[in-house]
Image (cartoon, grey):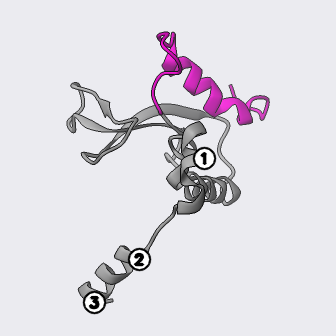
Amino acid sequence: MTGSRCLALSNKLRFNDKSSRSERGKRDEFAPIRDLWEVILSNLKRHYVPDPFITADEQLIPWRGRCKFLQYLPSKPDKYGIKVFWACDAENQYPVGAVPYLGKIGNSAQVNLDRNMATRLCEPFFGSGGT
């Protein structure tokens, strides 16, 4: 594909329905790409059966654009980005689940955020033969 064709397609490519954007945005800040995100995650889960051991970790995807849930983490090589919690197969690092961090809920601080996200990601695999 030529560079001009790629640029033309990327200018036309949209994952968001403008007619319902404001309604969906009120209840879900991840709404513009939620549908695409869910399709990708369902395909990851459908095509792979993980080993009994699952690893949960966080990743900062570098991003400098405008975003309501942009995170600043000074300890990471890229300081600004979108924080995503991943559940991966411990043996070969194949992703089996992911949750984007959309910021705190309400005005109260979230206690044990990493533990809660790890539990949420690994819940579908509880009782499947691993620890």
Q: Secondary structure at mark 2?
A: helix
Q: Where residue 47 appears, x then y in whole percent?
A: 67, 60
Disc nearer the start of the sequence (3/1): 3
Disc 2 marks which residue? 12
Q: At label 2, which amino acid type do we have?
A: Lys
Camera-side residue of 42 and 103: 103
Quarter of the rendering occupied by the C terminus: top right
Residue for badge 3: 2
Question: Can you give x and y, in whole percent of width and height, for residue 64 in the image?
Answer: 24, 45
Element at badge 1? helix
Q: Residue visible at 70% across and 57% down?
A: 46
Q: Report the residue marked by disc 1.
A: 23
> Image quadrant of residue 123?
top right
Tell me, yes or no, if residue 17 can be seen here: no
Q: Nearer the viewer, mark 3 or mark 2?
A: 2
Q: Is residue 64 above or below residue 42?
A: above
Residues rendered magenta in the picture: 102-131
Label 2 environment density (alpha carbons within 10 Å; few <14, some 14–19, many ≥20): few
**Neighbourhood count class around disc 1 (C-alpha, 10 Å): few under 14, some 14–19, many 20 upward:** few
Residue at horizontal 58%, vertical 61%? 19
Q: Quadrant of residue 87?
A: top right
Q: Which mark is residue 103?
A: none
- The magenta stretch spans residue 91: no
Name the element at disc 3: loop
Tell me the kind of residue under disc 3: Thr
